[in-house]
Amino acid sequence: MKKLLKNDVFQFLSLSVIITLFIYGLNGEKGAIVAKTVYNTFIEVLDIVVAVSIFIGLFQVWVKPSTIVKWLGKGSGLKGFILVCTFPILMGGSLFTVFPLMKTLREKGARQGAIASFITAWGGKAPLLPLETKFLGWPFALVRLGFVIIFAFIMGLLMDWIGERPTKPM
Amino acid sequence: MRAGTIYLLIALVLLGLSLLKEKQRTKEAIRATFKIFYVVMPVLIFVFVLMGLIQAYVSGETITSILGQKSGILGILYAETVGCIALFMPPAVFPFGGYLHDNGASYGSIAGFVFTAILIGITTLPVEIKFLGKRFTIARNIFTFVLAFLIALLMEVILR
């Protein structure tokens, strides 16, 4: 039971149910609106979320983090820099999974600009394009992706510009 | 055909190709897929509840007045701040953003929200400091906030 209560999945689902029921208890009409929004959106995105999960699952297995690190090298030179600003767009995952990978890249001798570029480019989130285009449309998604590359590029320049100081990670 | 169906078909074709190439890895991929779905879906449902709450209690006019085109620069800054604090997983960012847009938020605000929600997290700060150091973390987060603001402004001009 204790384990169940600590489970994120259980927490999110039970919180969702509790909030909806609570609102329904306060005001039936509002509660119905909440429930309807949840149901409609769920039906709308179910197949997309399944597809996206498959995309990310396949990518994780076929392009292992160690492969990425090896492939990107130090992210130095123009070619390395361009790779670091574009390739991570294809990756899934959350910030929690990116930071440990960045530490490895750093230990291999990557500059902090390259690391910052990588994190920013990772924010491109191409695997989520099905979701993004569904809710915000292709023009938004494509313009945003284009800017992500520029964003990553400037980010790298700025982070290199401020220079590194050998402060040890805590 | 629904866009979702097409994506699903593409995903299944890729899965088939993967299976032809290597059975073991494909098994791993399927396991990973289930895990991702299992982790992501509950968060999405929770975000749908938040969307429902806004639908029920916040009028479109309110959203427009805070995040709409007329609120301009301030709207983008509000949206970015929400993005920094929100504990959203990346997959939940787009449905929520789209929802706000349908209810009057400008593309610029949504862009600001999307960028900071994905790239900045109050909860991830300690993790970033632990892995990459304090100086790096502070600089990256500040630069991200500022650059996201400038890009959001540009996107607002381009997409309006």
Image: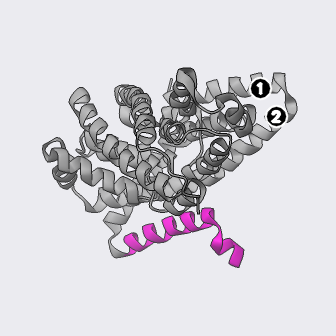
Rendering coords of residue A165 (x, y %): 50, 51
In this rendering, position of residue B13 left or right of residue B101: right
Residue linked to disc 1: B18
Residue at the spot x=42%, y=34% of the render? A157
B102, above or below B126, in the image: above
Residue linked to disc 2: B25
B22, above or below B139, in the image: above
Between residue B3 and residue A159, name the one nearer to us.
A159
Q: Amino acid at mark 2?
A: Arg
Mark 2–mark 1 CB contact (< 8 Å): yes
Rendering coords of residue B78 (x, y %): 26, 54
The image quadrant where one finds the C terminus of chain A is bottom right
Between residue A60 and residue B125, name the one nearer to us.
B125
In this rendering, position of residue B66 left or right of residue B17: left
Specify few, some or many for label 2: CA neighbours under 10 Å numbering under 14, 14-19, or 20 or more. some
Between residue B110 and residue B37, name the one nearer to us.
B110
Q: Which mark is residue B81?
A: none
Rendering coords of residue B52 (x, y %): 37, 57
Give the residues in magenta.
A1-25
Q: Amino acid at mark 1?
A: Ser
Q: Is residue A138 part of the magenta span, yes or no?
A: no
Chain letter belonging to callout 1:
B
B67, above or below A136, in the image: below
Rendering coords of residue B44 (x, y %): 51, 52
Labels 2 and 1 positioned on one and the same chain: yes
Outermost residue, bottom direction?
A2
In what element is the residue under mark 1?
Answer: helix
The image quadrant where one finds the N terminus of chain A is bottom right
Specify few, some or many for label 1: CA neighbours under 10 Å numbering under 14, 14-19, or 20 or more. some
Q: Is residue A12 part of the magenta span, yes or no?
A: yes
Kindly tell me whether residue A28 is visible in this rendering: yes
